[in-house]
Amino acid sequence: MDPLPSREIADMSGAAALPRKNGELVFNEAWQGRIFGMTVAMSHEACFAWREFQAHLIEEIAHAEREGESTSYYERWLQAFEQLLTDKGLIDTDTLAERTRDLQSGRRDDVF
Amino acid sequence: MQHIFNIDESRHAIERMAPVDYLGSSYYERWLDRNIRLLVEKGVITREELERRMAQLAGGTDPATPHSDPKLTARMLRVTKDRTPYRQPGPPPCFALGDRVLTRHDAPVGHTRLPRYARGKPGVIVRVHGTFIFPDTNAHGQGEQPHALYSVRFDAALLWGDSAEPRAPVHIDLWERYLLPDAPARSTS
Amino acid sequence: MSGGHDEHGHHHREPESVLSLRVRALESLLVEKKLVSSEAVDRIVSAYEQDIGPHNGAKVVARAWVDPAYRARLLADGTAAIEELGFGGVDLQVVENTPGVHNMVVCTLCSCYPHALIGLPPVWYKSFEYRSRAVREPRVVLREFGVDLPESTEIRIWDSSAELRYLVLPERPAGTERLNEADLAKLVTRDAMIGVAVVKPPAGASH
């Protein structure tokens, strides 16, 4: 009865609201769309409930505000997503750091 | 995949919420309440089952096992993208473009799509849309009874009186059963 | 755990390119572990970008501006005309703004909205205030939205009381004769298609 995309995701409100312009989602950089898509895809696969991710997002935003960090919405999203994946034992930060270095150095060249 | 309930039943379920609840709810809380109410009425879930599951989830256990079912997903996508055809064959329209009509003023018992502000008001037919499923009967399981739907134009002064703004007519989509002729029908030549 | 700590332990805002790398690394790992597929990510990004924004409606408006025959078909049968452009799923009635007529859409009974063409309804559209005032005092409401129309302009309010959805075809702003269809579409806002805004000419356009 609920047409795609998910209202639960699209209609998050308050500080967690997806950035929009003229009603449209705004991804200023390609990576923002990718991290959004990855999070949604994993929730579709029931790796976690959307509400779980949303709670992490809200907490990350609140933390960033308290600390006066000038991070953007999707930077905070990324933090929240990594935290959730780590909490669930789905990734570990060392492997992620190593993979990041490999991409940076050109040792790997995954393109999405 | 059967449709468990239709949009008219959905809307009517919202209308049956206690007014105090309706005014306090956000839009999506009303949506959720509507869905719960209808699922319980249709016997898909019981309130006890729902409350038990909520208690389990609140306690941190989720009895549902995560799984993905691509075939089910594909079926669900097809269902949600299909538009239920509201246009259905029905009897020919009684009113024509330009006809003057008067909306019924009797308050309906159940679901209706005649707004209260437009009851017992004179208007003019500005478009004949075709025949559509009738929500007043469809919402109560009395059948679709499709018949003519019109766009009816109302002068602001006739709706709101002296305080109406100038040149601000309101157009409402209304079913024939909401309408009576307001002037002798034009003779066909 | 927070990002942005460099070797000196200072917490700072990461440059964009490092973020992009990090996200690529994540995708790389998650794909490897078969927790996501990149195709699914592509589909999701497309769906959210396209299906919940006003792009679709803007394309319809821009086509009507450049093609008078399409405009006529759109006004006569909105449902069929939008299907020509690949949009469907809505029984549509398009109402055109002209120098003497301004159209405005509301759903007083709930909050019906042409989602397929203009995405999600804004919060104010669903509010009791808009739903009751748009029919009662449209000129005042429009002024609050920054639209000041002369008293001689007729304001037609359309209350979406049935399953037909309404879309306003705004007037094409002056000074846009040289723009192509894609550039015209970029000017068209969601609010203009609801009828609480007019389409502004691009900055620097001659009048």
Image: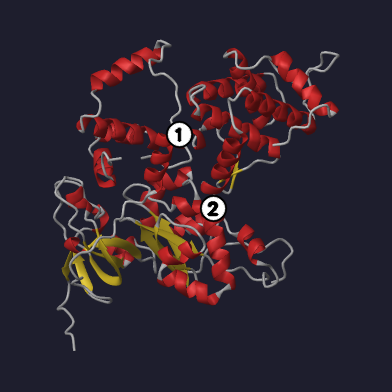
User: Looking at this view, is B103 or A3 the one in front?
Assistant: A3
Asked if residue C99 shows in the view, the reply is no
Residue B181 locus on image (x, y percent) = 16, 71
Location of residue C135 in the rendering, given as x and y in whole percent from the top left corner: 36, 57
Q: Is residue B61 left or right of residue A20?
A: left
Q: Is residue C207 above or below residue A79?
A: below
Query: Label 1 neighbourhood size at 10 Å, few (<14), some (14-19), many (20+)?
Result: few
On the image, the x and y values in percent for residue C159 come to 35, 57
Mark 2 vs mark 1, foreground winner is: 1
Q: Secondary structure at mark 1?
A: helix
On residue B70, which mark appears? 1
A81 vs B102, nearest the viewer: A81
Label 2 chain ID: C
Residue type at tag 2: Pro
Chain at numbered mark 1: B
Q: Amino acid at mark 1?
A: Pro
Q: Residue at x 77, y 26 (%)?
A: C13
Q: CA distance from mark 2 to mark 1?
A: 30 Å
Q: Are marks 2 and 1 on the same chain?
A: no
Q: Which residue is mark 2?
A: C54
Closer to the camera, B130 or B1? B1
Camera-nearest residue between A6 and C43: C43
Q: Position of residue B68 (x, y in %)?
A: 46, 28
Viewer can see residue B24: yes
